[in-house]
Every structure is written in structure tokens, then in C-alpha cells.
Image: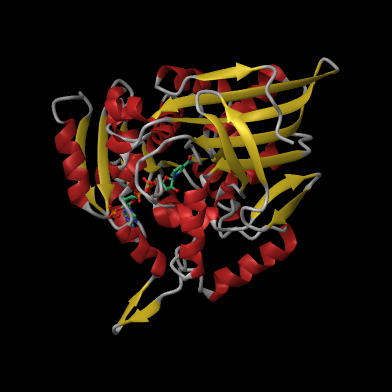
Amino acid sequence: MSKVLVIGCGGVANVAIRKCCQNSEVFTDLCIASRTKAKCDALAADLAGKTSTRITTAQVDADDVKQLKALIDAYQPDLVMNIALPYQDLTIMDACLACGVNYLDTANYEPEKLDDPAWRARYEKRCREEGFSAYFDYSYQWEYMEKFKAAGLTALLGTGFDPGVTQAYCAWAQKHLFDTIDTIDILDCNGGDHGYPFATNFNPEVNLREVSAPGSYWENGHWVEVPAMSIKREYDFDGVGQKDMYLLHHEEIESLAKNIPGVKRIRFFMTFGQSYLTHMQCLENVGMLSTEPVLYEGREIVPIQFLKALLPDPASLGPRTVGKTNIGCIFTGTKDGRPKTAYIYNICDHQACYKEVGSQAISYTTGVPAMVGAMMLLTGKWNKPGVYTVEQFDPDPYMDALNRWGLPWQVDDHPVLVD
Ligand code: NDP
């Protein structure tokens, strides 16, 4: 029996909560809390009578540690699942520490406001010293390591698909397939079509910030940064077909570089169609991706937040999206002194996800691993006080659970490599 507090009730949380309710032996009690309580109530109403998980709802502003502490103290959960936004990671971790509760999330910390001088000074120092300029990095959350250890609590960071499942693939490849891993290419392909000229598959602000930033990869012990979308490859994806993909910076590269011993290169590629890129370029050129507030008719507005209000809600794309995703990792390395390659990947069908949980595959492929990560903590399989990413735990129970709960994976021993 376990009680879980879920914070956030957007596209990803909707799937994670529905999957928790399918698994009510583990998730006996859930409290769904978010900024807009009406969304939590609507989901709870929809689930009523369909699950034996007992569901309650609450309103919370997760930027406010005091409110979070009051809610956690009142509900007394075994685990807090942070499926709000990366902006709330640190406040929720603080509240979990104060109340003695385990924590998980699906994306690493990123500040909402980029003009705070203290944050900026630290950011600029990191850009100079580390060599990548993304606004997010793990350092803020890794700083909680000793506090979580001392409190005997576990924080599991980034248990979505990428980050998340991709790191479980790496740990599983390391454990079962390779003696040494030399290179990792993470390939994230979305072959889905929602029929809109332009929409993002998850939170537009977070998504557009990510894809409009410079790309970077890890090679021979350091970061190599390149202009946004300047490295392009084509790849023929199983279940999807030929797609253009572009090298992006991605958060799991940072932790994998530390945790996969001897790895020489780690890259991340995501597929984009030409129309998406053209839209994004235009929006960027006219300033619509900016996070700096502008004064409009006497009121401050943040362009990217205004854009979010205009774009389709990612949670509404489910019924319209057809096609498949294919996300996985290609490895090169050695086994028993011989060169070896492997490709571990999952194919997910947008419409099948919609039929099962009412969401498209991007929310599905993130929400299922959030539930699976929670299950690892709640069933004691992944208990290790401190702050860890997915590849730092035994991958076997997680990989088994992915097969069982909707994200089956396969291994190709002779994949086409990316040059
Ligand atoms: P959505 O924008 O759909 O949902 C975010 C939810 O968080 C909303 O319910 C929102 O409330 C709530 N929220 C935002 N701010 C606060 C706050 N201050 N207090 C309380 N609740 C708040 O996002 P997604 O579901 O698409 O994404 C959720 C997370 O998953 C993000 O961190 C994203 O980066 C991550 N993600 C990870 C992936 C992976 O593979 N690892 C892939 C995709 C996403 P409201 O309804 O009021 O706006």
C-alpha cells in the first residue's frame, strides 16, 4: 500500500496518473495537485469507478515551498512525483526534504526567469568552464545529494523517456551486452502527424527553448557545441521510415558522460520536418521565442508564454495524431575483445496510446516511465538514499516493467550506424 502525491496535471501527468491507476496494487492512494485544480478534478472524475486507487485532488502553487510543505504534511505521501515543469524541481525537492518524503521528476532544473543576476553569473561561469550553453544542467539538483543521503531519502531524476528510458537502455547495455561502450547515439524520432501547421508535442515553452538552443555533444572528455540545427543526418527508422534528424543538446548526455565508464562520444538526435523548422525559425526571427517580458498596452507579456496560449494544447493532440515514434540508443563498443554494436529501441503508436489513455505517444512515452520509476521506489527495488539518475540503478526491474506496462523494447545487433 502506498500513497503518492502527483504535482502537475498536464499532458504527461495525465498519462502517468492513468498508468498508476492501472497499477492500483502498488498505487493505492493518489493525490493529484496542480496550479489549476479544475484539471485535477476533471481527471479524477473521469477515473472514478474505473480504478480501485483512491484519488483526491488539491490546489497548489509548486513555486511556493510553504504551500508544498502544508500539502505534503496534510497528505503524508510515501513519494512526490513532480510532473509539473522543470522550473519547480528545486522548490519541490526542498519541500520533500523538509517533510521527509522521496522525490522523482521527468526533467532537470531550469529557471523560469533568466534575468536573475545570481543565476546568470553561475550560468555564465558554467558556460565558460564546461563548454555548453543550455539553460538547464544537473548541478543544481546534484547539490542535494548529501542532504537526501543524510535524510535517508531517494530522489530519482529524469524518469521520462529521454531522459529516463534512454539511460535504462544504456545501463542495460552496459550490464548485459558490452564490456566497454565507446559511443552512444540517442535517436528520438517522432513520425506522428497531427494535421496542424505547427504544434509542439509537450509543453511549448520547454520544448521550443530546447530545440532553438545550440546543439552539443560529448567527445573525448569534453563538450563540443555547435550552432542550433547545424548537424543533420538521415536515418531509416524501424516502423517509421526515412527521416531527417538534427543534433541537439540533451540533459542525459551530462549524466551518462559521468556514469558510463570510458565512453568516448555521446550524441543526441531528434527528427524534425522542414515545416516545423521553418515555423520555428520565423517565430525566433520575430522574437516570439523570447523569454524576456515586453510591455504591450501597459502590460508585461512574455512572448513565448503568449505563443503558448496561441498554440494547440499538447494534451489535445491525441485524437488527431497518427503514426509512430521510435526512440532508442545505438551503441558501439567491445565484448570479449571483439567490436560490437547494438540498438535498443521502442516503437510506440500514437493512435494505440490514444485508445488506451486518451493521449498521443509523446505524453505516453514520458508518462509510463514516470509511473515505472515511481514503482521502482515504492516497491523498494531502487532504494538508495541520495540523488540519482536512471542509469545509476539496476536496469533489470525497470526494463521488465517497461515491457509489462506499455513500452516494450527490442534489440537489433546489427544496426545501421550514424556517421
Ligand atoms: P504541461 O504544460 O502539459 O503540464 C504542466 C503541468 O504543471 C500543468 O498541469 C501545470 O498547471 C502544472 N504547473 C505548472 N506550473 C505549476 C506551479 N507553479 N504549481 C503547480 N502546478 C504547476 O507539461 P507536460 O505534461 O508536457 O510536461 C511535464 C513535464 O514533463 C515537464 O517537466 C517536461 O519537461 C517533462 N517532459 C519530459 C520528457 C522526457 O522524456 N523526459 C518528455 C516530455 C516532457 P496549469 O494547468 O495550471 O498550467
In-image side of 368 versus 168 (left or right):
left
Q: Residue lying furthest bottom in this view?
A: 298
Q: How is the image coloured?
A: secondary structure
Residue sitting at x 28%, y 53%: 70
Q: Position of residue 47 (x, y in %)?
A: 19, 31
At a point 64% along the width and 24% down the height, the residue shown is 343
Residue 191 vs 41, above or below: the answer is above
* x and y, in percent, of residue 276 in the image: 47, 50
Residue 412 falls in which quadrant of the image? top right
Q: Nearer the viewer, residue 263 or 59?
A: 263
Q: Position of residue 282 (x, y in %)?
A: 48, 63
* Between 277 and 186, the one nearer to me in the picture: 277
In the image, is 38 to the left or to the right of 164? left
Whether residue 91 can be seen here: no
Q: What residue sits 66% from the left and 39% below the top? A: 256
Q: How many numbered discs?
A: 0
Quarter of the picture holding the C terminus: top right
Please indicate whether residue 396 sits to the left or right of residue 3 in the image: right
Question: In the displayed structure, would residue 289 be above or below residue 219?
Answer: below
